[in-house]
């Protein structure tokens, strides 16, 4: 019996998406492939809700994040990294690997980033050129107010970089409307595709900064990716060997999302999250954060006193063949987590999870 994945990525992949991984290998170049590539990029732009340039990079979501941050720093943007959780710490590590001149705004990790705190930091340091934040901290399930932070960045005329790895395709995110200059995600979460690809969109404002320098490095240098997209547009519009099966699977998953529609996709994730959170509280555990700032893509849960979260995770997988996630970092041994992303964000799947958790608590 197959174990169902209810972790914060990777997610269960629909059969028709998996089928694309099993097709005969083909060359990642030539006019036919270039056509498929650009069709996929245009579909990804529809999911991002952007008209900006977009690149599909062989690597994880972190590769897309590093491409965004490193390229902006290479163009001279001094970053402010806003940290309210473990993945904010990762953004800080990435930025720090490119420059020692990183400003950090550390905030409590059990609540969203207050936009006014970002505004104050930018007023105090007019030399900052980019703000980097995480949309959803999957350790805690806190969802940060990207729209409002984007408005702050616009007022101060700084670039806005968002790690949307655990939200894009599942939580409302409007790249252009919310003023996101660099938006990064991965294929294996809300997009419902296998792991292995990172996607990043780049605004014209960001290009004006990035193109000022030669960038840092080569593989994750967005100047390089744009150069190949232009020079080899009609046969090989990327600088590396594309992961053909993963790319074709991504195309199919994007088709599925767009057939459902973005508003309907977001609503499906919201309904699944609401059902799970209400059910969890009825069973006795507590959700780590209140509903008003909880992500619709993952729920972090505090077990009843005296019950180790690892025991719940182990029981649910062993007896019900459902894989949940434990806590990581400072929350290891304190919480367990349920991912409701992509194809798994269904009310019927939430009912299965609640039944399994109830059994583990009995």
Image (cartoon, rainbow, N blue to C red):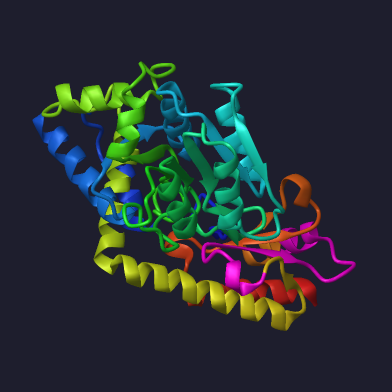
Q: Tell whether 135 sits left or right of 88.
A: left
In the rendered image, the vertical position of residue 127 relative to residue 315, given as above or below: above
Task: In the displayed orientation, state which residue is furthest to the right.
Answer: 306
Q: On screen, 72 above or below 354?
A: above
Looking at this view, is 29 or 44 the one in front?
44
Residue 286, image x, y percentages: 74, 72
Q: Which quadrant would residue 221 be assigned to in this image?
A: top left
Q: Residue 337 appears at what percent x and percent y?
A: 66, 60
Evaluate whether residue 12 shows in this view. Answer: no
User: In the image, 360: left or right of 10?
Assistant: right
Q: Quadrant of the N terminus?
A: bottom right
Asked if one can make out residue 289 in the rendered structure from this viewpoint, the answer is yes
Q: Report whether 197 appears left or right of 323.
A: left
Residue situated furthest bottom in the rendering = 282
Residue 345 placement (x, y as % from top left):
47, 67
Residue sitting at x 55%, y 29%? 95
Q: Residue 92, located in which quarter of the rendered image?
A: top right
State the extent of the magenta-drawn residues as a range.
Answer: 290-315
Indicate the quadrant containing the C terminus: top left, top right, bottom left or bottom right: bottom right
């Amino acid at each position: 019996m197959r174990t169902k994945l209810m972790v914060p990525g990777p997610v269960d992949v629909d059969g028709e998406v998996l089928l694309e991984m099993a097709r005969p290998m083909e060359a990642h170049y030539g006019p036919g492939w270039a056509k498929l590539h650009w069709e996929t990029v245009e579909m990804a732009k529809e999911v991002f809700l952007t008209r900006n340039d977009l690149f599909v990079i062989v690597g994880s979501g972190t590769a897309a994040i590093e491409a965004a941050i490193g390229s902006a720093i290479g163009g001279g943007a001094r970053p402010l990294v806003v940290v309210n959780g473990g993945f904010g710490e990762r953004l800080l590590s990435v930025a720090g690997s490119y420059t020692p001149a990183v400003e950090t705004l550390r905030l409590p990790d059990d609540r969203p980033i207050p936009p006014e705190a970002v505004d104050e930091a930018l007023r105090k340091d007019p030399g900052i050129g980019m703000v980097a934040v995480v949309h959803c901290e999957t350790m805690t399930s806190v969802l940060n107010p990207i729209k409002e932070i984007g408005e702050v960045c616009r007022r101060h005329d700084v670039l806005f970089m968002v790690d949307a790895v655990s939200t894009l395709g599942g939580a409302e995110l409007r790249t252009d409307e919310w003023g996101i200059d660099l938006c990064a995600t991965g294929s294996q979460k809300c997009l419902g595709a296998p792991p292995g690809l990172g996607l990043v969109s780049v605004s014209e404002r960001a290009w004006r900064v990035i193109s000022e320098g030669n960038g840092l490095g080569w593989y994750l240098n967005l100047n390089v990716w744009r150069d190949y997209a232009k020079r080899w547009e009609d046969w090989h519009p990327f600088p590396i060997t594309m992961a053909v099966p993963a790319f074709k699977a991504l195309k199919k998953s994007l088709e599925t999302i767009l057939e459902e529609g973005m508003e309907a996709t977001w609503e499906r994730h919201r309904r699944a999250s609401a059902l799970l959170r209400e059910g969890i509280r009825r069973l006795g555990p507590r959700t780590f954060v209140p509903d008003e700032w909880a992500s619709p893509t993952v729920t972090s849960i505090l077990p009843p006193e005296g019950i180790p979260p690892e025991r719940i995770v182990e029981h649910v997988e062993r007896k019900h063949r459902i894989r949940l996630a434990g806590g990581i970092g400072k929350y290891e041994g304190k919480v367990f987590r349920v991912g409701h992303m992509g194809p798994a964000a269904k009310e019927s799947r939430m009912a299965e999870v609640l039944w399994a958790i109830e059994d583990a608590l009995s």
